[in-house]
Image (cartoon, grey):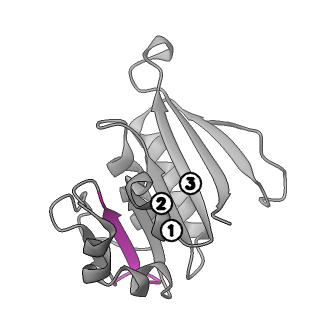
Amino acid sequence: MTTGDSTANKEFKKEIIETHSAQETFALGQRIGLEALPGQVYTLIGDLGVGKTVFTQGVADGLGITEPVNSPTFTIVQIYEEGRMPFYHFDVYRIGDVEEMEEIGYEDCFYGEGLCLIEWANLIEEILPEHYKQVTIEKDLEKGFDYRRITIEEMTTV
């Protein structure tokens, strides 16, 4: 795993990480989970099959969650409470409009005491919190089948 564009003290605006295996992508997610603070929100952007679930499983592992973690495509949100803080995992790919998020009670998760991770967050941009971290996962088959370029950016909606 190689990193770039970040400062030495972890106070970064943008960090680019290159992974070369599913294990490295998992390990990056695990690092996020280990360093996570209550109330943080991460959005996860990437095409189908790019490794979002592997990354998310790493985050859950870093939080101390041992139960199986899969994408909540049909349930929209899966809540895990066994780790060191609650983990709210959203997959909003099938959301028709923001009102569906209100029915789910998204605010309790977005502004709660756990870590919130939202897949396909570009579909609900208008309700994202003022500050969040966006994780973008991209493939580059020219660099190998398992190569991923992962960008983590501080985002502000103001």
- How far apart are the alpha carbons under marks 2 and 3? 12 Å
Q: Is residue 122 above or below residue 97?
A: above
Is residue 102 found left or right of 13 in the rendered image? left
Span highlighted in magenta in the image = 81-92
Q: Residue furthest right?
A: 8
Q: Residues within 10 Å of mark 3 (few under 14, many from 20)?
A: many
The residue carrying mark 1 is: 128
Quadrant in the picture for the N terminus: top right
* Residue sitting at x 32%, y 80%: 102
- Mark with earlier residue (3, 1): 1
Q: Residue furthest top?
A: 142
- How far apart are the alpha carbons under marks 1 and 2? 5 Å
Q: Is residue 63 above or below residue 113?
A: above
Q: Are marks 2 and 3 in contact (CB under 8 Å)?
A: no
- How far apart are the alpha carbons under marks 3 and 1? 11 Å
User: Given the image, on which type of amino acid does mark 1 rest?
Assistant: Leu
Q: Residue 68 location in percent, x, y?
A: 23, 64
**Element marked by disc 2:** helix
Q: Is residue 45 magenta?
A: no
Q: Are marks 1 and 2 in contact (CB under 8 Å)?
A: yes
Q: Residue 29 location in percent, x, y?
A: 49, 55
* Residue sitting at x 32%, y 84%: 105
The residue carrying mark 2 is: 125
The answer to which quarter of the image holds residue 90 is bottom left
